[in-house]
Image (spheres, rainbow, N blue to C red):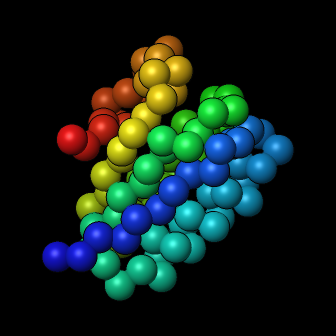
Amino acid sequence: MSTARLILPADLRHGNAAACMATLQAQIRNSPDSEVEIEAGQLTDFDSSALAVLLGCRREAESLTKTLKFKQFPAKLRELALLYGVSELLVESA
């Protein structure tokens, strides 16, 4: 099984979150792969909008019955997910 690999930008804040989510969701939708991996290793400047983007991608993948995996979350993003109570929805893959 092949995997589509998507990478979050370094800066993901309220101002660019909608555009980022639209782009990622289109990539998920248009990918012929049944598995999608989102890497967050480059993410350095972000706010809670990053969580909204990841949750939106999760919903998109689920609606298409695709497997979505998350990789390389910065520690601050993990903390933010815990704070907002969504960490169980954004589980990182090994």
- Residue placed most toward the observer, 59 or 39: 39
Any part of residue 29 in sight: yes
Give x and y (percent) for residue 53.
Answer: 58, 47
Q: Residue furthest left?
A: 1
Any part of residue 52 in sight: no
Give x and y (percent) for residue 27.
Answer: 52, 73
Q: Is residue 64 left or right of residue 24?
A: left
**Which residue is depicted at the point 40% across and 65% down?**
5
**Which residue is depicted at the point 71% across and 42% down?**
11
**Which residue is depicted at the point 43% across and 34% down?**
73
Q: Is residue 39 left or right of residue 18?
A: left
The quarter holding residue 34 reads bottom left
Q: Quick check: 44 above or below 27?
A: above
Q: Quick check: 4 above or below 9?
A: below
Q: Quadrant of the C terminus?
A: top left
The quarter holding residue 78 reads top left
Give x and y (percent) for residue 85.
Answer: 43, 21
Q: Residue furthest right?
A: 15
**Which residue is depicted at the point 48% across and 41% down?**
41
Q: Quadrant of the N terminus?
A: bottom left
Q: Residue furthest front?
A: 42
Q: Is residue 69 left or right of residue 44?
A: left
- Residue placed most toward the observer, 92 or 55: 92
